[in-house]
Structures are given as structure tokens and as C-alpha cells.
Image (cartoon, rainbow, N blue to C red):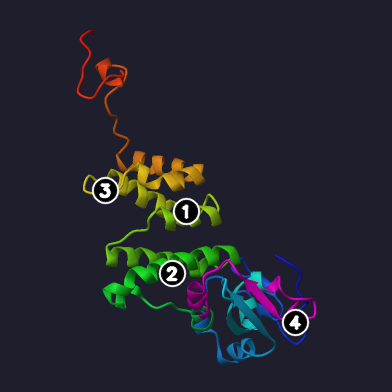
């Protein structure tokens, strides 16, 4: 996604479809940082540091530049040709510090906490943070962590018995591409809420999302179509026409 420096001649690296070469290290795609050997891990924790400020309050982290670039070429784009940070810092004012905290854990440890091990009152909060983590990872190109985040989100929703409302759904459609699996997930959640006879949610509940994203409306309608087994309701052109007339409540037309 940007310029990168040629690797040091003393290092060797290999290209295959799972990796992109960046500097002396290979960009991790489907591996786990916990599985790298000690020598490589030590090298990743050497070299320059990057100052990262997240959220409106600019929560601060100091992270290893080599490790960041090992995980994602997003961070490589913030490096000059000499391999040092362009400005020594990275500003992420629109991202959630709680989500970035989970990202840091995964960058260094290769894992997230499991929501299944959390008490009930913590499950939804963690699920919500994992949704924010997913959006962050979509932007900085971390597909492996996106998969972990969406899994923890689903488990958190199921374990807490809660699902996102329109306010939580709206940012997903604002910050992810049309092909995003997370869009598919939340549109199905909305469709199920609308279809559930025991739910108080109706299409009106999601007006905010319908107004802000035509894609959301299309996805929800398609999800309802799939969820109903494409079962047809009665032909409206054959029904008694009175139900389409304007008159007082309870009044019926006398003519056919």
C-alpha cells in the first residue's frame, strides 16, 4: 500500500500468496505471532518505536514499529524510506481506545480474551468493543483479527442475550465495504428482529439505518426473503379492495 525500503542484504525472505514482503520481515497473513521463533520475535521487538494516539482523548501507546509493520502494511505506509516513522507518531482520532487495546493484545500475543469466560454483565460490553475492533481492523487490513473479532461479537451477543440496535449498526455500514461479512451479520440480526413475533422491534426501529444506507435496506429485505424461505403472501391485487381505501377506522365500504 505504500513505499517500503529494500531488505537488508543479510536477511532473506520469501514471497508466497499468504505474505507480502516488507523490509526484512514477512507480513503475517494467517499465522500467529505466538508461533514465531525466538530470534524473529526478538527482532520484531527491536528497532524504532511508534507513538500511537487513539480517540478524541488521544489515549497513548508506544509500540514497536517492526512488529506493527509485520502485521499490516497500513503501518508501513507511515514509514519513510529509511525505515523510520515519518513523524514518530500515528493519530487515530476516530477510533475507539477500547478496541485498540484489544488490537495491541493481539499484535503482541496473537489472541483475544474469550467472551465465554466473562461474567454475564461484561459480555455485551466486550461484544460491542469487538464490533469496533472489527471496523478498525477492516481499515488497517487485518483480516485474521477481523475473523476473531466477529466470532467474539457473535458469542457475546448470544451469551448476553442482546443484539445491536440501529445506533450500533449504522457505523458498520458507514465504515465497511459492501462485501463485508459484518454487514451480512447485522442485516440478518435486524431482519430476525423484525420477523420475530415476540420482538417489539419493527422496520420503524431501523429507520435511522434505512435513511443513512440504502445498502442496509436492501440487505435486510434480502435477509427477510431468505429467512422466510421465499414464501409468497397473498396476491394484493386479488384481495378485497376495501383495505386499500381511505376511510375512518373500523369503517368498511358497502360497494364491491
Q: Which residue is mark 3?
A: 200
| Secondary structure type for disc 1 | helix
Q: Earlier in the sequence, mark 3 or mark 2?
A: 2
Q: For the residue labelled by badge 4, is the local secondary structure a helix, a strand or a loop?
A: loop
Residue at the spot of label 2 = 129
Separation (CA) of disc 4 from disc 3: 55 Å
- Relative placement, left or right, of 15 versus 7 is left
User: Residue 17: where, in percent of width, then height?
Assistant: 61, 65
Q: Earlier in the sequence, mark 1 or mark 3?
A: 1
Residue 233 among those drawn in magenta: no
* Mark 4 in CB contact with mark 2 (< 8 angstroms): no
Residue drawn at the location 29% of the way across and 30% of the way down: 232
User: Which contiguous range is marked in magenta?
Assistant: 76-104
Q: Residue at x 73, y 67 (%)?
A: 2
Q: Is residue 157 above or below residue 80?
A: above
Task: Tell me the quarter of the image containing the C terminus.
Answer: top left
Taking the magenta stretch, the answer to whether it contains residue 83 is yes
Residue 170, numbered label:
1
Q: Residue at x 66, y 82 (%)?
A: 50
Mark positioned earlier in the residue sequence (4 or 3)? 4
- Say if 246 sits above or below 166 in the image: above
* Rendered image: mark on residue 110: none
Q: Can you name the residue that lies furthest to the front here?
A: 248
Which tag is nearer the camera, tag 3 or tag 2? 3
Q: Secondary structure at mark 3?
A: loop
**How far separated are the C-alphas under marks 3 and 2?**
25 Å
Amino acid at each position: 500500500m505504500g513505499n517500503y525500503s529494500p531488505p537488508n542484504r543479510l536477511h532473506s525472505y520469501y514471497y508466497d500468496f499468504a505474505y507480502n514482503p516488507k523490509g526484512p520481515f514477512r507480513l503475517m497473513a494467517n499465522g500467529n505471532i505466538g508461533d514465531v521463533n525466538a530470534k524473529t520475535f526478538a527482532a520484531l521487538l527491536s528497532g524504532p518505536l511508534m507513538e500511537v494516539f487513539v480517540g478524541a482523548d488521544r489515549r497513548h501507546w508506544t509500540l514497536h514499529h517492526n512488529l506493527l509493520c509485520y502485521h499490516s502494511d497500513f503501518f508501513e505506509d507511515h514509514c519513510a524510506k529509511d525505515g523510520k516513522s515519518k513523524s514518530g507518531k500515528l493519530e487515530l482520532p476516530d477510533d475507539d481506545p477500547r478496541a485498540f487495546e484489544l488490537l495491541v493484545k493481539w499484535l503482541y500475543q496473537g489472541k483475544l480474551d474469550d467472551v465465554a469466560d466473562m461474567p454475564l454483565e461484561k459480555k455485551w460490553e466486550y461484544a460491542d468493543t469487538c464490533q469496533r475492533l472489527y471496523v478498525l481492523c477492516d481499515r488497517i487490513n487485518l483480516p485474521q483479527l477481523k475473523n476473531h473479532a466477529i466470532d467474539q461479537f457473535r458469542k457475546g451477543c448470544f451469551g448476553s442475550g442482546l443484539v445491536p440496535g440501529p445506533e450500533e449498526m449504522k457505523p458498520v455500514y458507514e465504515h465497511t465495504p459492501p462485501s463485508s461479512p459484518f454487514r451480512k451479520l447485522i442485516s440478518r440480526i435486524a431482519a430476525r428482529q423484525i420477523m420475530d413475533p415476540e420482538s417489539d422491534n419493527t422496520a420503524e426501529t431501523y429507520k435511522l439505518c434505512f435513511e443513512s444506507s440504502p445498502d442496509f435496506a436492501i440487505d435486510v429485505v434480502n435477509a427477510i426473503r431468505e429467512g422466510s424461505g421465499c414464501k409468497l403472501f397473498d396476491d394484493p391485487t386479488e384481495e378485497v379492495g376495501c383495505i386499500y381505501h381511505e376511510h375512518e377506522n373500523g369503517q368498511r365500504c358497502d360497494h364491491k
